[in-house]
Image (cartoon, rainbow, N blue to C red):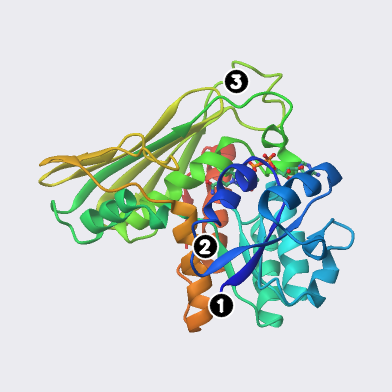
Amino acid sequence: GKLGIALVGLGSYAGGQLAPALSETSNCFLAGIVTGTPEKAETWKTKYGIPASNIYDYKNFDQIKNNPDIDIVYVVLPNSMHAEYVIRAAQAGKHVICEKPMAITVDDCDKMIAACKKADRILGVGYRLHYDPYHLEMMRLGQQKIHGNIKSMSAGFAFNAHKGQWRLDKAMAGGGPLMDLGIYCVQAFCYVTGQTPLSVTAKEGPKTDPERFATVEQSLTWQFEMPGGIKAEGFSSYADSRNTLKVEAERGAYELTPAFNYGGIRGKGPDGNLSFPAVNQQALQMDDFALSLIRKRPVRLPGEMGKRDVAYLQAIYQAMRSGQKVMLK
Ligand code: NAD
């Protein structure tokens, strides 16, 4: 049968994307919820037909260990809370999917990986774009050098983040737009080349709204040096608009713009426009995770990859603060 998923944190991503996606999945379904808001529990209970016995709050969450309906806990909380809930889920004997960024420190990532290992549970990260056909095509073009060796890449992701949300609070988010949006660029540089960066330099952009960006950067650019002399330039901002992934290869350029959306991605290559059918990224992502558990095979996006990326984000901040090139292992 299908595996039961419990969503933890019923915010905009859980409500707007994951819950609807779970009505399109074949290997898993929305079996339970964890929320601190009784009104949300009531709404979700009715809307998705969730039995009262599968509804938890943050205090009684650990009792989920006694609930055989729940196989997988999906943590969709603010970044700083991922570690605690992934660890508690593993200790309750559940497999875990964690949203990006996996945590706000590498140390937390280590603890999350260790807790899942100790409990013999699987940890995966919600990197949905690995299931989007446009991004799979970018991987094919890049990794198989369809248009020759890559010379350079650039990626930018930016939107306007409104005041008053946890995303602008360093304690909750771990940082600013880099943690939230830049991570997509970091991911893309790795999966398009099939390589990992060797070093990084970075520069913080000006704070034109110092009040809104009191604890986090407003914008940030960074340059990775990748194997083969590939230069990759990333940009992320909470006071701008950008959504693009561009690759310059020896025999032509290819790009996605918009690149990082849930749907409506558009792409072009040296031979014209790319065209793929629309998919539900989140449904494919959760189904593949569930199928990996069912088939007892490794998951495609494990906790180790989430930790790797958090280490790159931290190295970018280190390069930004020091003004020096930071070598990556
Ligand atoms: P959100 O603010 O809409 O939702 C966060 C939820 O956590 C809310 O329901 C809130 O009530 C709950 N919460 C519990 N304790 C809280 C506390 N102490 N402070 C604040 N909120 C608390 O955020 P979101 O956009 O749904 O993001 C949640 C996570 O999902 C983040 O890690 C984010 O990076 C990730 N995300 C991923 C994608 C993706 O495409 N993969 C998209 C959006 C968000």
Task: Give the amino acid at mark 2.
Answer: Met
Q: Which residue is mark 2?
A: 286
Within 10 angstroms of label 1, few (less than 14), some, or many (20 or more) residues? few
At 79% from the left and 51% from the top, the residue drawn is 35
**Alpha carbons under labels 3 and 1: distance apart:** 52 Å
Residue 184 in the image, given as x and y percentages of width and height:
46, 46
**Alpha carbons under labels 1 and 2: distance apart:** 15 Å
Label 2, secondary structure: give it: helix
> Can you see residue 100?
no
Dot 3 or dot 1, earlier in sequence: 1
Dot 2 or dot 3, earlier in sequence: 3
Residue 86 in the image, given as x and y percentages of width and height:
71, 64
Residue 174: image quadrant is top right
Whether 141 is drawn above or below 266: the answer is below
Whether 231 is drawn above or below 108: the answer is above
Q: 108 or 23: nearer the eye?
A: 23
Task: Give the amino acid at mark 3.
Answer: Lys
At 84% from the left and 68% from the top, the residue drawn is 62
Residue 191 in the image, given as x and y percentages of width and height:
36, 57
Label 3, secondary structure: give it: loop
Tell me: 163 left or right of 124. right
| Label placed on residue 1 | 1
Foreground: disc 1 or disc 2: 1
Residues at circles 1 and 2 in contact by the CB criterion of under 8 Å? no
| Label placed on residue 30 | none
Tell me: 127 left or right of 41. left
